Image (cartoon, rainbow, N blue to C red):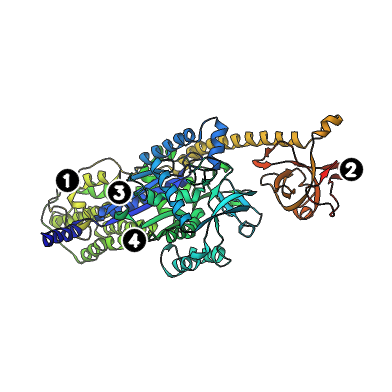
Amino acid sequence: MRKRNLYTQIGAIFMSKKPFYITTPIYYPSGNPHIGHCYTTVACDSIARYKRMQGYDVMFLTGTDEHGLKIEQKAAEQGVTPKEYVDVIVDRFKNLWKYMNISYDRYIRTTDDYHVEAVQKIFKALYDKGYIYKGEYSGKYCTPCESFWTDSQLDENGCCPECHRPVKYAKEEAYFFKMSPFAERIEKLLLETDYLRPKTRAVELVNNFIKPGLEDLCVSRTTFKWGVPVSFDDKHVVYVWIDALSNYITALGYENSAHSDYEKYWPADVHMVAKDIMRFHAIIWPAMLMALDLPLPKHLAVHGWITMAGKNGESEKMSKSLGNVVDPFVLGERYGQDSIRYHILREMALGADSLFSNEIMINRINSDLANGFGNLVSRTVAMADKYFGGTLPTDREREAIDDEFEATVTGLCAETDKYIDETKLKQVLEEIFKVVDRANKYIDETEPWKLGKDDTKKARLAAVLYNLLEAIRVTSALLAPFMPSTMPKVWEQIGASAADVEYEKLSKFGVLPANVTVHKGEILFPRIDVDKEIEELNAILTKNMEEAKAKLSSEEKGEAAAETEKIELKPEITIDDFAKVEIRVAKVVACEKVKKSDKLLCLQLDDGMGGRQVVSGIAQYYTPEDLIGKKLQLIANLKPVKLRGVDSNGMICAADTPDGVKVIFVDDSIPVGSKVR
């Protein structure tokens, strides 16, 4: 009995499909999804579809990262709860993925109960192992990126190195994750394995984050509540990246009972992310897994940004704050989802940025899809219909050129397999279209229109058309993961059955029936009038951008009004009024210009009470270097305001003089925190 059970188990192993696990990052639902979100998701969807075609048991995961201060603030601005706010945005993401024909197997939300339960267990496990400890955080924090940074990691303007927005000084009790124990192993992972793709990113990460000394990571917050509570210290919520990164295993059932396929699919075959969150997935995530004694993912594929032409012709990342986000619904309605899927994947090489413009997109659709593949299908089907009434005769006449053409077609699958395994989708499409171009050239070389005029050449003409149909069968099957809506229409036109386009038959020639019957159909990719279309599309996109910028300008005007109100001198007050004002001596420990403002400086002050950030309209009169190290007078009990989106907790005292504004500095011998009266 035991022997038979053993044989049954072995047989089941050999008969079962090999698992393949691929993930997108979980997207931050702070605004509507755009074409940049589409790239990662379409790329992962195409790989998942290709692997299913190869016979793998695929798990394709996507989702949304829904906690953090930024979400809490946006929800408050709209007068709703954070959960109500993210529910609306998540629906928009799901609607877009449905529209773009995304075949994800599982969608995780970090607000899901099972995920919250698992994250609390993961945090506690790391604490019990001694990798998490309580301390105090003092440093720079970027709210949009939910990221802490050291001074050495900030960009040349002292801003967040990822989004280049101003950071603010933060000081609070926090839990920390020990990173240094894993530095050597992570460096080897990045430099000595093919975990990170492209490999060129590895040296950058090692030099910027590991060589200077891998600093411990702040993994909890106390200044907001919208997050996963720390189970053993409810004053703290789990830092968003510990929460978010855990999704890749909690979605499979790790430390929860909602799912039960962790053992089957982990470790992930591919995590795909954009370069702005590369550090978290290349350093922090492996460190977490090492601390938990869990297997590491096999590959991290890092792609660039879809950019648009900015000022002076320079490209800039798509950003809602710039008003340059392209709505994929608008593009899809005009050109079809498959055309958009093809374009964004065809333009971006792994690791590099991709410039987006209406002209580039339309020319790509015209050249590759309309003139290339679409024309190949329509010409071949039309000739089979014209010369043979749609059904090819079985008599064939072969020539030497056919051998080379057949070898080109049958060798394609091996090339695309290789690039799929390397997550190089641009190269996959390039290889497919080399065969498409070769097939169009084959038409020119064999001149079937001449063969059709000679009754003695019918067998040769049938051979040529059959060879072309075979080339279309193979290329369309390999394009199906990238353009899943269009390729079934192609198979119908060329007379291919579902069995004819199975993966195992894509390296073979002569699969279609000898007497195959074609069916003329609609034009797959109508050619676009470039000039007319660019004019119309630019008008639509310009309108959308102007509306977005107008909204942003309106918000800035509101902030500027608040700025003016706080900086203007106050009217006369009584001694009782003055008694309400608390003025303290403070020292400027750091200072920087506020982005998008000509007159605001952001000062980090040591006020003897734990430190604070103050924004002051003195940039026309002082540089940051003029102020750092100086002591000044601070109005310490002024109600906090937000100026140009930056928190200001007080006001510094200055005087209006004929030569401009002069800050009232204090003798250096007076201790910080001293009260001025």
Sooner in the amino-acid sequence: mark 3 or mark 1: 3
Q: Amino acid at mark 3?
A: Ser
Give me the C-alpha separation between circle 2 and circle 1.
91 Å
Q: Nearer the viewer, residue 471 or 84?
A: 84
- Mark closer to the chain start, 3 or 4: 3
The residue that disc 1 covers is 390
- On the question of residue 167 being in view, the answer is no
Q: Is residue 293 above or below residue 44?
A: below
- Measured in 3D between alpha carbons, the distance from the residue under mark 3 to the one under mark 1, in whole angstroms, is 52 Å
Residue hosting label 2: 658
Indicate which label's residue lies in the foreground, 3 or 1: 3
Q: Position of residue 441 (x, y in %)?
A: 30, 58
Query: Crowding at label 3, few (<14), some or many (≥20) Cα neighbours within 10 Å?
Result: some
Which label belongs to residue 421? 4
Determine the secondary structure under disc 2. Answer: loop
Q: Nearer the viewer, mark 3 or mark 4?
A: 3
Numbered label attached to residue 260: 3
Q: Nearer the viewer, mark 2 or mark 3?
A: 3
